[in-house]
Each structure stands twice: as structure tokens, then as C-alpha cells.
Amino acid sequence: MPVLTCPKCEMTVFRGGYAVWQWIVAIFFFPVGLVAMAAGRQPTRCPYCKFIWQA
């Protein structure tokens, strides 16, 4: 899992991932399910300062 730095507090955080429904749709409805993966990943949230951004 990629590690990022929070732009607000400079702490190290993990990048936001995909929702479970996106993985299920991508697996069972391949290749159309890849659109579900392109629909967007969950935003990255800093556990220290609670800042949310799309990374």
C-alpha cells in the first residue's frame, strides 16, 4: 500500500483504497467492471489532523 505525506501536517499516511463493491464488480464483470475501478478511489484521510484529500 503506497505511503503518502499529509499536505497539511506533514505526517505519513496510507493512500485511500477502493470500496469492496468496486472489487466485486471488477472481478465478476471483467472487462466492463474496470469502469467501476475507474469510478474513483476513496479519498485519503489523515488520522492525525483529519484532513481529507484525493491522492
Image (cartoon, grey):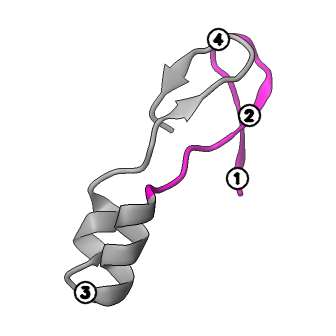
Element class at badge 4: loop
Q: Which one is earlier in the sequence, the residue at label 2 or at label 4?
A: 4
Compared with 11, 14 (above or below) is below
Q: CA distance from mark 2 to mark 4?
A: 12 Å
Q: Nearer the viewer, mark 2 or mark 3?
A: 3
Q: Is residue 34 left or right of residue 54?
A: left
> Residue shown at 56%/44% (left/top)?
16
Amino acid at circle 1: Pro
Amino acid at circle 3: Phe
Q: CA distance from mark 2 to mark 1?
A: 9 Å
Residue labelled with disc 3:
29
Q: Which one is earlier in the sequence, the residue at label 3 or at label 1?
A: 1
Residue labelled with disc 1:
2
**Residue in the foreground of this view, choosing between 53 and 42:** 42
Sort mark 3 into few (<14), some (14-19) or many (20+) by Cα contacts within 10 Å: few
Q: Is residue 37 left or right of residue 1?
A: left
Compared with 11, 32 (above or below) is below
